[in-house]
Image (cartoon, helix red, strand yellow):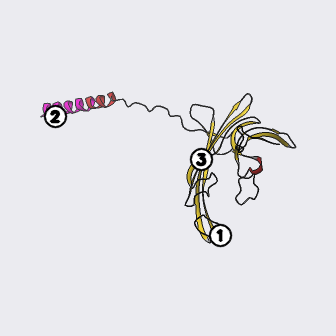
Amino acid sequence: MNIKSLLLGSAAALAAVSGAQAADAIVAAEPEPMEYVRVCDAFGTGYFYIPGTETCLKVGGYVRFEVGFGEDTNSFNNGDWDSYSRAQLDFTAKSDTELGTLTSVASVRFEANQDVGYTSNGSSNGTYINEAYIQLGGFRVGRWLNWWDANDLPGELDNLGSNRLQSISYTYTGSAFTAGIQVDELSRLQGVGGQNVGIEA
């Protein structure tokens, strides 16, 4: 009886030890460290570092819905109404260089309307570049709203408003004033082979 108990106890002990050794032999691989997105506060709120670079990126935009009533609202008939939708997606990238802050802006608009010719780019439904430019210090090249209409407000009466032009500009910002010069590529003149160039100051 004692020998039987002793043998059974020894077998149980050996099984427990071998089980413990088998459990210890399995080693779980440690997870590799991940690079999380870091907040970039050097250029204001909303920016984050692009992983692996020192470039800061900000993504934004808006959705807009507009309804118009009354005469000449659309091309179908007078006294009707018309609706208009827009979604805008903005990307702004910034990084510091020896020559100043390097900024790249890409803004795309998606527009939809039942009435042909109502949208600002002359199409009823479409996608177009709202703004796309590169800026280094005070120098800027690309396409953006001209200085006559920097805020793109609706309902403006000026003929030069809401124009996005291919331009080259330089802006000096002092402690008490800001001054700049800009050369715009205007639309082609009828009967003229070249491009008309306008200068704003």
Foreground label between 3 and 1: 1
Residue sticking out furthest to the front: 191
Q: Which-is-in-front pick, marks 2 and 3?
A: 3
The numbered disc on residue 5 is 2
The residues tagged by marks 3 and 1 sit, at their Cα atoms, a distance apart of 28 Å
Q: Nearer the viewer, residue 180 or 122?
A: 122
Q: Is residue 162 above or below residue 136?
A: below
- Three-letter amino acid code of the residue under disc 3: Tyr
The image's mark for residue 195 is none
Residue, disc 1: 71
Q: Earlier in the sequence, mark 2 or mark 1?
A: 2
Pointer 3 and pointer 1: residues touching (CB < 8 Å)?
Answer: no
Farthest residue, direction bottom: 79
Count of numbered marks: 3
Q: Is residue 5 above or below residue 108?
A: above
Return the x and y of residue 100 as percentages of the image width and height: 74, 32
Residue type of the residue flagged with mark 1: Glu
The local secondary structure at tag 3 comes to strand
The magenta-colored residue range is 1-17
